[in-house]
Image (cartoon, rainbow, N blue to C red):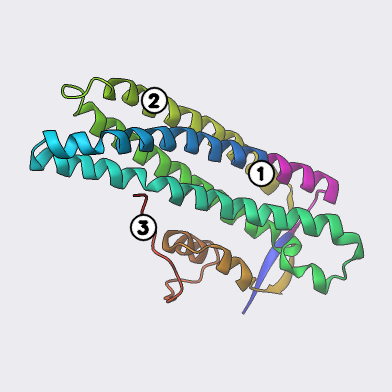
């Protein structure tokens, strides 16, 4: 299968700079996510036995929903790391580009416009997922405020984390848009980079990959679900 992609107006130095800035913002997003989820996980583990001994079945079920929501930390971290991995590979290739022949450059360099589009979609989905989970946790903890005083501070923590994550996501989105607007409308035909598909190991990521590359629905037995056990 052959597809056509635009080539970038920017030189290698400019592209490396933008991609490194992107990875710095990705690292910030991972840090915000960790600072959001990990303290909550520790609190949940601390109070888990108390909940089991002092609440009814309905409350225990609500507590289980909180635990399930906290599992998304690993999912969000992996999503961000997959974006970071592709950017790091691009940076490596741009630094080596002077010694590569055109054929050897096809892994990432010639697919950069599509990679930009793909990672923008993946990053947007990650932000939406973080906002949804933060809101769900905030709502669940509000329901516990009458029974556990410490949950009041948690609701503020969730709201602040969601705002910080969205603000940093917006900066990263602007950087990706800067990359995208510097792609000139000049096309070359290349084989689809299937190795990119393998980087995205979760089903939700693969779905977005197929949408961006117009591949329709595909089934792959090696795809992992998005369910990751935390406890």
Q: CA distance from mark 1 to mark 3?
A: 25 Å
| Residue in the picture at 38% in, 56% down | 228
Q: Earlier in the sequence, mark 3 or mark 2?
A: 2
Residue 153 rendering spot, x and y as whole percentages? 33, 20
Q: Secondary structure at mark 1?
A: helix
Where, by quadrant of the figure, is residue 177 drawn?
top right
Q: Is residue 147 magenta?
A: no
Visible residue check, residue 119: no
Where, by quadrant of the figure, is residue 45 drawn?
top left
| Residue in the picture at 49% in, 45% down | 124
The quarter of the image holding the N terminus is: bottom right
Where, by quadrant of the figure, is residue 55 drawn?
top left
| Residue farthest right in this picture | 99
Residue, disc 3: 227
Q: Earlier in the sequence, mark 1 or mark 3?
A: 1
Which numbered marker is on residue 197? none
Visible residue check, residue 24: yes
Q: Secondary structure at mark 2?
A: helix
Q: Earlier in the sequence, mark 2 or mark 1?
A: 1
Residue, disc 1: 23
Q: On the picture, is 101 further left or further right than 24?
A: right
Q: Is residue 18 magenta?
A: yes
| Residue in the picture at 39% in, 63% down | 225
Which numbered marker is on residue 157? 2
Q: CA distance from mark 3 to mark 2?
A: 24 Å
| Residue in the picture at 58% in, 40% down | 173
Q: On the picture, is 1 further left or further right than 184?
A: left
Question: Which segment did they paint magenta?
Answer: 7-23
Main SS of the magenta part reads: helix
């Amino acid at each position: 299968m052959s597809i056509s992609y635009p080539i970038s107006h920017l030189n290698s130095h400019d592209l490396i700079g933008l991609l490194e800035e992107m990875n710095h913002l990705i690292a910030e997003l991972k840090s915000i996510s960790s600072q959001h989820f990990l303290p909550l996980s520790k609190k949940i583990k601390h109070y888990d036995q108390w909940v089991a001994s002092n609440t009814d079945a309905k409350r225990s079920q609500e507590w289980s929903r909180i635990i399930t929501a906290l599992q998304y930390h690993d999912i969000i971290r992996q999503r961000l790391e997959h974006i970071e991995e592709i950017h790091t590979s691009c940076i490596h290739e741009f630094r080596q580009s002077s010694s590569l022949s055109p054929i050897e450059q096809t892994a990432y360099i010639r697919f950069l416009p599509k990679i930009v589009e793909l990672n923008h979609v993946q990053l947007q989905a990650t932000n939406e997922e973080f906002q949804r989970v933060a809101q769900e946790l905030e709502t669940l903890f509000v329901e516990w405020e009458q029974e556990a005083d410490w949950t009041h501070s948690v609701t503020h923590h969730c709201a602040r984390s969601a705002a910080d994550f969205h603000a940093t996501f917006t900066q990263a989105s602007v950087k990706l848009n800067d990359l995208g607007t510097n792609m000139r409308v000049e096309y070359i035909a290349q084989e689809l980079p299937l190795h990119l598909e393998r980087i995205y190991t979760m089903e939700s990521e693969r779905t977005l990959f197929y949408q961006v590359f117009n591949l329709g629905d595909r089934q792959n037995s090696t795809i992992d679900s998005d369910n990751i056990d935390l406890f």
